[in-house]
Image (cartoon, grey):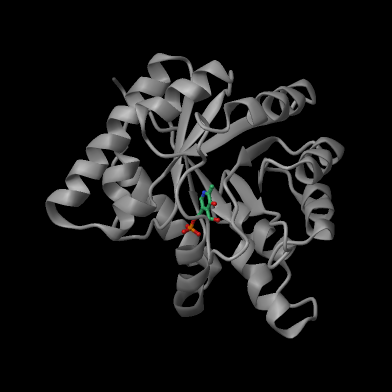
Amino acid sequence: MAPRPLRLGVNIDHVATIRNARGGDHPDPVKAALMAASAGADGITAHLREDRRHIRDEDISALLAALTIPLNLEMAATQEMLHIAIRHKPHAACIVPEKREERTTEGGLDAAGQFDQLVPIVAALSDAGVRVSLFIEPDPVQIDAAIRLKAPVVEFHTGLYAHLDGTARSTELRRISDGAALAAKNGIEPHAGHGLTFDNVGPIAAIPQLAELNIGHFLIGEAIFCGLKDSISEMRRQMDLVR
Ligand code: PXP
């Protein structure tokens, strides 16, 4: 199939991580989000974690007030986060698994195992006009659960792909590619993200069914060396090269 346009969602969580290290208001995640938009980001992603370790509640309001591109709110499947999402009505909400002690989102959501808990959350978000995404492993069992939950979007966790090399990486790439084909065949828009860098984004961006990549840590880290605009526009270029 002809590849569809591939959107870049820039995750600005780690701008807030740096801000919070000193407790003030610099660097401002909203300023970073606006700069990301002007550098070619199609959307902004922010994860409001239960412990508020980076993004805070007031960042979500400020982002929504300032942005003219869509906001994708990453959230745990809790009542607290559901109420926040329904109050703010971001363009999209990506439901992620969340463990207090983890450094970042480790592994995908067990949509099959937590099916009953997810039914009312997905339904309430959808009723509020929020586009629901489920951050899952590219596993047919999880994709089947997403279909049954009527989620319009799944985001495949690319963390394993990013950490493997050689044959193991190729095998994982195939799993993501097969997952994207299965999701698309069933009317679900597949996205991907986690651990993507200039070095590993190409084969993922080349998967024709993928509609969006969400990238954060590498882009913010690379901005230390080349600035945020160049970091994002180079990622955009690398993605476009293979589409
Ligand atoms: N997508 C989701 C659902 C995530 O939880 C994260 C990490 O916050 C990302 C994408 C971006 O991952 P990274 O920061 O490794 O690029």
Tell me where residue 150 appears, x and y as whole percent. 58, 18
Tell me where residue 46 appears, x and y as whole percent. 65, 53
Q: Is residue 1 above or below residue 242?
A: above
* Residue name at image x 37 percent, y 47 percent: 239
Q: Residue furthest bottom?
A: 22
Q: Is residue 170 above or below residue 3?
A: below
Query: If the image is split into quadrants, where does the N terminus sit?
Result: top left
Whether residue 66 sits left or right of residue 148 in the image: it is: right
Tell me where residue 85 appears, x and y as whole percent. 78, 40
Q: Residue furthest left?
A: 167
Whether residue 54 sits left or right of residue 149 in the image: it is: right
Q: Is residue 105 above or below residue 173?
A: below
* Residue name at image x 65 percent, y 54 percent: 47
Query: If the image is split into quadrants, where does the C terminus sit?
Result: top left
* Residue name at image x 77 percent, y 53 percent: 63
Tell me where residue 56 appears, x and y as whole percent. 78, 61
Whether residue 239 sits left or right of residue 21 in the image: it is: left
* Residue name at image x 66 percent, y 24 percent: 119
Q: Nearer the viewer, residue 190 or 67?
A: 190
Whether residue 174 sits left or right of residue 35 in the image: it is: left
For the image, the number of numbered tags is 0
Task: Specify the quadrant of the image occupied by residue 87.
Answer: top right
Task: Specify the quadrant of the image occupied by residue 115.
Answer: top right
Q: Nearer the viewer, residue 15 or 5?
A: 15
Q: Is residue 196 above or below residue 185?
A: below
